[in-house]
Amino acid sequence: MTSLATEQTISETPFARSGTHGELTAFLMETTDRVGADTYMLVALLHDQERTDARIIASNWIYDAIQLAGHQLIANLAQSPFAAEPGGRPRAVITASAPALPGVSGEDARLLNVLGHSEIFALKLNVGRQRMFLLFSAEAVGRIDLAALLQAQFECCYGLSRMPDMLGAAAAQDPLSDRERECLFWVSEGKTTDEVAVILGVSSNTINSYITQAIRKLSASNRAMAVATAIRSGII
Amino acid sequence: MEAARLDQSDTATAYAASAHEPPPAVSIPDAVRRCRWIAVDLNADGFGLFFISPSADRARLVPCFDSNYPHVAPATKLLSGHGGDELSRLARASTAPCWWSSNDTCRSAAAFGALNWGARISMPMPQGAGIAFPVYADRSQCGLMAFFGAEIALPQQQLAEIHARCFAVFSAVARMRAEDSGRLPSISKRELECLKLTANGLTSGEIASRLNLSVHTANQYLTNTTQKLNAVNRMHAVAKGLRLGLIE
């Protein structure tokens, strides 16, 4: 039961040789084809001090399109109000008509249009507790099949759940050890170092060192930021 | 004509055939009714909705309601004990539905076995058959919608639609819970701004200079927010603010 639905297809493609990321590529290409889209882009969003940045996990956008659009615009597309939760109704971003979307200017829309993204759909994915975003676009408006999109959104949630190692983001998002995660959870519940020490039955120094490790691993600058980062990425 | 595709009704018609999207459930009895409809469509005997505790030490299924509402079904008791351990662990890591069956020849086992995406798990209860759909809502809330019965029918092409309906019920229930537990005192825009910057790792001093306030005022805003959220310190306030969706 652990085999992918696309196993047949994958073993017959040259991607099988390129290892795990090839499997992800084959899966996404097949899905893109099924919904009638031309390109896909799978992204995770990273929140840092100032803004939200897109981390591209897989994509068949041309290199120049990614460079010209920039990660900020991609992040804004992914979290636009037109994006749909699993089972929700996605709305197309029609780049020719320069829709009023937060963070997507008329100029951005024209650029995407010139780059061949006439119609863009953003789907929110739940891969276990991880939140990811999938952009599908087509060169011609109306080519993407909406009913197939709903189906594809769930299949991507299922399929990506089976490829935790391939997502990269997964490892990057939960770098904590069980003990560190446990400590951070109690900190998020308002417990002080001494209280956590009593709860877990170890010394306060040990707790502090776990928390310092957790702060460092999450690239946070203090406890509050570590708690926020961990909650945003679904670690605690 | 391109603008016409922006019209929501266009999308709505395209989706009508594949997905029901009625207005979200507004009360628990309403949500229970929607689950009954799903159970009827699946030909299931019973159902249960669970939240998965965010506790770091042991993931556990916390019952919300089931087909015996307002009472509690025996299956719910089994799953909220150790029976649900594997299910809650799986649901945190994978969105794919999980199923179990003590009898390989029943109709349910045949339907589940034919699914492209189902994962068979060890029996979470002494006997019977069932399928569980992991569900998620905003602010990384995680849950599980389980259906029980030996006669369940679930063709592959209906899987996404059924799962979509489970998501809709869960997000409505999660929202009701947040509103219930919340009854939030009004937190001012300035206070929220300070809380957000704290979550982003800024110190009171940095917040003060960013917002052109004195350090004392920034601290005062944060103390107010902490009190209003019924939190014991800033870390707790940041966690509560994020989990309640007050800040992103």
Image (spheres, helix red, strand yellow):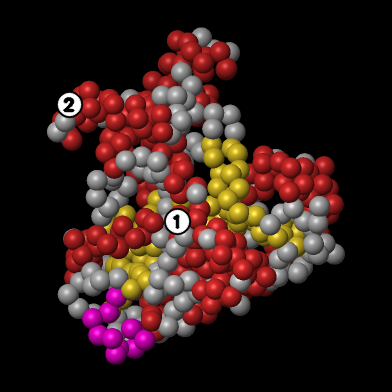
Label annotation for residue A203: 2
Above or below: residue A45 compared with residue A208: below
User: Is A219 left, or right, of A10 in this rendering?
Assistant: left
Query: At 54% from the left edge and 77% from the top edge, which residue is drawn?
Result: A8
Give the chain letter at badge 1.
A
User: Is B78 left, or right, of B37 in this rendering?
Assistant: left
Looking at this view, is A235 or B130 the one in front?
A235
Check disc 1 and give the amino acid type.
Pro
Query: At 79% from the left edge and 62% from the top edge, which residue is drawn?
Result: A139
* Residue A82: percent from left, percent from top: 65, 54
* Residue B241: percent from left, percent from top: 42, 35
Residue B91 visible to the viewer: yes
Query: At 38% from the left edge and 80% from the top edge, which residue is drawn?
Result: B112
Query: At 30% from the left edge and 50% from the top edge, which residue is drawn?
Result: B53
Total labels drawn: 2
Above or below: residue B173 compared with residue B182: below
Label annotation for residue B197: none
Residue B169 visible to the viewer: no
Can residue A132 be found in the magenta stretch?
Answer: no
Check disc 2 and give the amino acid type.
Ser
Above or below: residue A235 compared with residue A147: above
Q: Are marks 1 and 2 in contact (CB under 8 Å)?
A: no
Looking at this view, is A10 or A124 the one in front?
A10
Label annotation for residue A164: 1
Mark 1 surroundings: few (<14), some (14-19) or many (≥20) residues within 10 A: some
User: Is B91 left, or right, of A77 in this rendering?
Assistant: left
Q: What's drawn in magenta, residue-wise? A: B99-110
